[in-house]
Amino acid sequence: MLIHFPVAALIGLIAADSAYLITSDFFWARMGLWLSGVGAFGGWISGFVGLVDLVTVRRIRRLITAWCHATLAVMLLSLASLNWLLRLNGAEDYIWPWGLYVSLLTGALIAVTSFLGGQLVYERAVGVDIEVAVERSAKH
């Protein structure tokens, strides 16, 4: 659950930026400020938890996919933080072109990072207690 809220906020940021550019309504600029903040801070919290897993679990540490996912996640969090900092002192000042550009680039990185995260969970069973899963499947 730590991942879903920041990702949703950063994807919603693309919509808020687009809505601001179409309507020029300051509401969307303010919404973008909040969404970028939630995305950045929530992302850093989930990133810290992921880093703890990467560093402490030997099976995860040995996976190239995990290192690629971690590297992209750092880039993603850097962009999300930059996007929030751009908006901090003037929510509408940097939406065009930099805010929207960084939001779109962040969305693209989310897609790639999520794909790698999905590979880790569904193909490599990262975050799954394999012994418990085997026990449960043997009972059924």
Image (cartoon, rainbow, N blue to C red):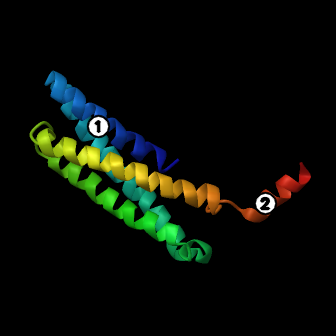
**Residue 111 image position (x, y, % from top left):** 41, 49
Asked whether 137 or 52 is in front, the reply is 137
Residue identifier under label 1: 14
**Residue 51 image position (x, y, % from top left):** 46, 68
Which residue is rendered at x = 21% and y = 33% of the image? Answer: 30
Q: Could you tell me the amino acid type at mark 2?
A: Val
Secondary structure beneath dot 2 equals helix
- For the view shown, which residue lies furthest in the right direction? 139
Which residue is rendered at x = 77% and y = 57% of the image? Answer: 133
Which residue is rendered at x = 51% and y = 67% of the image? Answer: 65
Residue 46's disc number = none
Left/right of residue 125 with respect to residue 56 in the rendered view: right
Say whether residue 52 is visible.
Answer: no
Task: Pick whichever of labels 1 and 2 is earlier in the sequence.
Answer: 1
Residue identifier under label 2: 132
Say whether residue 64 is visible.
Answer: yes
The answer to which image quadrant residue 90 occupies is top left
**Residue 35 image position (x, y, % from top left):** 30, 40
Which residue is rendered at x = 78% and y = 65% of the image? Answer: 131
- Are the residues flagged by discs 1 and 2 in contact, CB closer than 8 Å? no
Within 10 angstroms of label 1, few (less than 14), some, or many (20 or more) residues? Answer: many
Look at discs 1 and 2 and give the one toward the viewer. 1
Within 10 angstroms of label 2, few (less than 14), some, or many (20 or more) residues? Answer: few
Asked whether 19 or 64 is in front, the reply is 64
Q: Could you tell me the amino acid type at mark 1?
A: Ile
